[in-house]
Image (cartoon, rainbow, N blue to C red):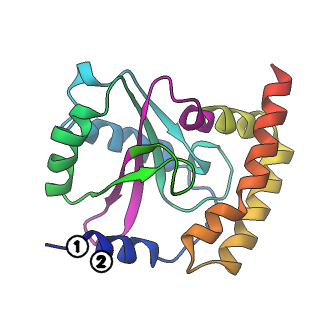
Amino acid sequence: MESFEAKLSRVLAERIEVVDYDPAWPALFDAESLRLAAYFPPSSIRCVEHVGSTAVPGLAAKPIIDILVGVDDFDFVVDSVAPAMERAGYDYFFRPELGDDGPRYPWFIGRDASGVRVSHIHVALVDDTPQWDRVVFRDYLRSDSDAALEYAKLKRDLASRFSGDREAYTLAKTAFITEALARARGRA
């Protein structure tokens, strides 16, 4: 059995690649959402959202489908869903939301038959604002093509600079995302 440290090292070492938009991404989201039904009983899920760059038509992205699953309680996910998904080949982490000391949430990495990372499943409480900001950010990029183009350019640049450092890549996007969320809220 792989130790937590070995698993964390393995997933953090995976290279970052940003590719042109693939019109198959919405169908991949649909397929992965259907697969989740095998692990999450329908009554345990309040909503499922396609978030992240693959959810924005035309936007360059890492070819990884981000899915946000809304639940009322983490206990069932941690006790029942996580073990079943791990047995099915998903990597599972109870990861921090914001920095190492932030609140934690269940997070899964889905892989294809060859072991390539193809999905991230973020499980959030329905009243967890930082997690649901992913939907606000997605909708902002869908509605502002200039911002989407600027974000794509930033991501390509960061992927070339931090292709082997997922944490640095993610951290370097924070200022853009924070500013975009402020602009999105200013529209409301």
Residue situated in front as seen by the camera: 180 or 72 = 72
- The residue at the point 16 percent across, 49 percent down is 83
* Residue situated in front as seen by the camera: 98 or 140: 98
Q: Is residue 146 above or below residue 100?
A: above
Task: Work out how far the residue at label 2 is from the one at label 1, CA to CA, in angstroms.
Answer: 5 Å
Residue 140 lies, in percent from the top left, at 74, 35
The disc label shown at residue 79, or none: none
Q: Which residues are magenta?
A: 106-134
Instruction: Where is residue 180? Give x, y as percent.
Output: 79, 41
Residue lying at 70% horizontally and 80% vertically, measured from the top left: 161
- Within 10 Å of the Cα at label 2, are there few (<14), some (14-19), or many (20+) other Cα atoms? few
> Which amino acid, by three-letter code, is at mark 1?
Ser
Task: Give the tally of numbered discs.
Answer: 2
State the residue position of label 2.
6
Q: Quadrant of the rendered structure where residue 99 is?
A: bottom right
Q: Is residue 123 magenta?
A: yes
Q: Which residue is mark 1?
A: 3
Crowding at label 1, few (<14), some or many (≥20) Cα neighbours within 10 Å?
few
In the rendering, at what x and y percent does residue 186 appear? Answer: 85, 26
Position of residue 112 in the picture relative to residue 50 (left or right)? left
**Residue depicted at x 48% and y 57%:** 64
Residues marked 2 and 1 touching at CB (< 8 Å): yes
Percent across and percent down for residue 22 are: 56, 55
Badge 1 element: loop
